[in-house]
Image (cartoon, rainbow, N blue to C red):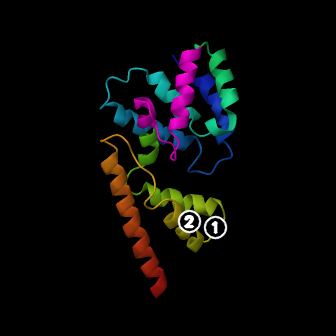
């Protein structure tokens, strides 16, 4: 059983200085997406694995060592820690997850926020980085649009819809900017 106060105390410093699209609200959105996908996978019975994987998603690539240390202090066994670390890594957008739990977390990350979210996230992130609108749109078209993949059949159509909406939005926005 997860001690949520301890978990939040541990992870908060890694999210406190992130932009609004990558702070703890980002993790909450991934948790919500994961819970929606979990309905299709009753064979995934370790909810703690999913929750830990979500919360470590945003900094596993920075401090895997401290995550392992934290989990040990929480009394988890080596096998449990290994699973949590694995699914945390598999949740990254550029990873190809192998485990079912990793696929679930990866896809929950990809579809967080729904149809309009790719646009919202990119515009907010671009602003936080100090980019111009043109720079943000260029980045979006080069690195986001047409990139990424979901692995679960329940997530694939959602991500396709997100990509299509984003493509149409960017095209219309660019056309509007030309005529302005």
Is 101 inside the magenta-drawn segment? yes
Q: Position of residue 106 (x, y in %)?
A: 46, 40
Residue 73 placed where, x, y %? Answer: 66, 16
Q: Is residue 88 visible?
A: yes
Q: Regarding mark 1 in the picture, which secondary structure is present there? A: loop
The secondary element bearing badge 2 is classed as helix
Name above or below for residue 65 compared with residue 178.
Answer: above
Residue 139: which disc? 2
Instruction: Please give the residue where the numbered disc 1 appears in the rendered image.
Output: 131
Q: Is residue 3 visible?
A: no
Q: Is residue 169 left or right of residue 86?
A: left
Percent coordinates x, y for residue 52 in the rendering: 53, 28
User: Mark 1 Cα within 10 Å, few/some/many (few <14, many 20+)?
Assistant: some
Q: Nearer the viewer, residue 50 or 10?
A: 50
Is residue 180 toward the left or the right of residue 70 in the image? left
Instruction: Write the residue at 52% across / 65% down.
Output: 142
Q: Is label 1 in contact with label 2 (beta carbons under 8 Å)? A: yes
Quadrant in which residue 39 is drawn: top left
């Amino acid at each position: 059983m997860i001690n949520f106060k301890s978990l939040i105390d541990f992870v908060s410093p890694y999210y406190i200085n992130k932009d609004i699209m990558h702070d703890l609200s980002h993790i909450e959105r991934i948790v919500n997406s994961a819970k929606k996908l979990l309905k299709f996978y009753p064979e995934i019975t370790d909810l703690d694995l999913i929750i830990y994987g979500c919360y470590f998603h945003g900094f596993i690539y920075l401090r895997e060592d401290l995550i392992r240390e934290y989990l040990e202090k929480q009394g988890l066994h080596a096998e449990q820690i290994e699973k949590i670390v694995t699914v945390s890594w598999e949740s990254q957008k550029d990873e190809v997850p192998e485990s079912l739990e990793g696929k679930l977390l990866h896809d929950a990350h990809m579809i967080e926020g729904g149809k309009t979210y790719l646009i919202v996230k990119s515009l907010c992130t671009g602003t936080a980085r100090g980019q111009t609108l043109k720079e943000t749109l260029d980045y979006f078209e080069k690195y986001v649009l047409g990139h990424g993949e979901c692995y679960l059949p329940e997530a694939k159509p959602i991500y396709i819809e997100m990509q299509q909406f984003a493509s149409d939005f960017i095209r219309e926005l660019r056309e509007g900017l030309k005529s302005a």
